């Protein structure tokens, strides 16, 4: 039972990832635009200086 509780969220995310990638690609119109959006979303942020 514990093994299923640990692996279930990972399996669900893996199943949703392919759907989300397809949806994002159809929304942007191409894989290149999708990769640019994903790269921008995961780019490291500069720390704020005060």
Image (cartoon, rainbow, N blue to C red):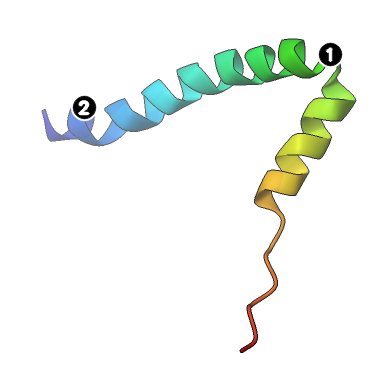
Give the CA separation, mark 2 to mark 1. Answer: 37 Å
Tell which residue pokes out farthest to the left in this image: 1
Mark 2, other Cα within 10 Å: few <14 / some 14–19 / many ≥20: few
Q: Which mark is residue 11?
A: none
In the displayed structure image, the side of residue 24 where residue 30 appears, left or right: right
In this view, the residue in front, 50 or 18, is 50
Q: Which residue is mark 2?
A: 4
In this view, the residue in front, 48 or 10, is 48
Residue found at x 79% / y 19%:
28
In the displayed structure image, the side of residue 2 where residue 11 appears, left or right: right
Quarter-wise, where is residue 36 in the image?
Answer: top right
- Dividing the image into 4 quarters, which one contains the C terminus? bottom right
Q: Is residue 47 above or below residue 20?
A: below
* Residue contact at pointers 2 and 1, CB within 8 angstroms: no
In the displayed structure image, the side of residue 16 where residue 3 appears, left or right: left
Tell which residue pokes out farthest to the front in this image: 50
Residue found at x 86% / y 17%:
30
Q: Kindly state the secondary structure of the residue where label 2 is placed.
A: helix
Q: Which mark is residue 29?
A: 1
């Amino acid at each position: 039972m514990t093994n299923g509780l640990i692996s279930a969220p990972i399996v669900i995310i893996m199943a949703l990832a392919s759907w989300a990638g397809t949806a994002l690609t159809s929304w942007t119109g191409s894989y290149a635009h999708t990769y640019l959006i994903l790269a921008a979303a995961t780019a490291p942020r500069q720390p704020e200086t005060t």
